[in-house]
Image (cartoon, rainbow, N blue to C red):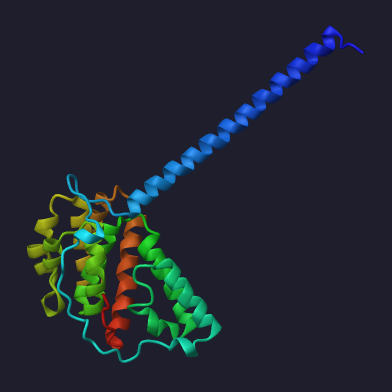
Amino acid sequence: RLLTPATMRIILALSLALFHLIGCQSNAFSNAGSSAFRSALVAAKLRGGATPKGTTAPADDDIPDYPTTSENFIARYNGPPDDEMTDEQREIRDDIIRTRPRTGISGPFGPWLAVPEIGWPSQQLGRACRYGTTLTMRESELIILLTGARHKAHAEFDIHQGEALRSGLTMDIISAIPRDDEFSMGRVKADLLPLLAENERDSAFAKYTAELLETSTVSDETYQETLKAVGGEESVLVEITSIVGYYTYVAYTLNAFNIPFKK
C-alpha cells in the first residue's frame, strides 16, 4: 500500500529528529573526549615539572654526573628476602615496582615490606605525595632535597639528585643546598634563595620548607608569603607540608637502617 502524504511527512519529521539526536550525542561524546584529552595533557605537562621561562628539562642522557655519598653504605637491614616474603609482601612489592619503574624497591621500601600494615599505606602515601599533588616535579624535588639535606639523609639526597636534574633543577641550585650540620635557614637564604629569585614559587617553597624543617613550624610572614605565591590556594600549603612530612619519615628510615643509594 502506498503511503499517504501525511504519513510521509510524519516519517520524515521523525527521521530528522532522530538524526539530530544522534548528531548531538556524537558531538557531546566528541567534546567530552577532547576535554578529557586536554585535561590529561595539562596534567601530564604539570606533573612533568615546569621549568623556568627560556629553559627546558634535560633528557636522561643529558643529565650531568653528580657526586654521591651513600653508595658504599652497608645496609643494616634491607627488608625480607624474596624467597621469604608472604603473599601480601609480594603484592606490595609488585605494586611498588609497577608504580615506580625508575626506582623500584630502593630506599625505604625494603624495610617497610617487613610490616605490610606499614608498608602498604606508606607506599600509598608516598605515591600521593610524589605524583598526586598539584606541584610540578621540579617543585617537589626541591622540597625533597631540602628535607634530605636537613635530616642528613645521604641516600635520600643521592636518590633525588638525579630526579631533580630530570625535572629541570640545575646542578648549581642543587649544590647550593646546605647539608647536614651546615643546614640552617640563614644558609638557605644566603646560598639558595638568590638562585631562585626569578621564580616566585620556587623561592617561596624553599623558604617555607627550610623554615618548617628548622623550627618545626612557619611564621605568619612566611605562611602569607607562600600563600600569595600560590594564588591563595591553601591546599598547596597542605601539599608542601605533606611532602616534607613524608620525606622526613623516609629520611628516618634510610638513616636508621643505613640504606645505600644504588645508581
Residue 212 visible in the current orientation: no
- What quarter of the picture does the N terminus occupy? top right
Residue 178 appears in which quarter of the rendering?
Answer: bottom left
In this view, the residue farthest toward the top is 5
Seen at 20% across and 79% down, the residue is 152
Frontmost residue, 164 versus 94: 94
Q: Is 168 placed above or below 30 here?
A: below
Residue 103: x and y, percent?
A: 34, 71
Residue 17: x and y, percent?
A: 70, 22
Seen at 8% across and 64% down, the residue is 191
Residue 72 appears in which quarter of the rendering?
Answer: bottom left
Residue 60 visible in the current orientation: yes
Residue 198: x and y, percent?
A: 14, 49
- What quarter of the picture does the C terminus occupy? bottom left
Frontmost residue, 207 versus 161: 161
Question: Residue 251 vs residue 3: left or right?
Answer: left
Seen at 12% across and 67% down, the residue is 175
Question: Residue 32 vs residue 181: left or right?
Answer: right
Q: Is 54 placed above or below 14 here?
A: below
Frontmost residue, 2 versus 217: 2
Question: Residue 55 vs residue 40: left or right?
Answer: left
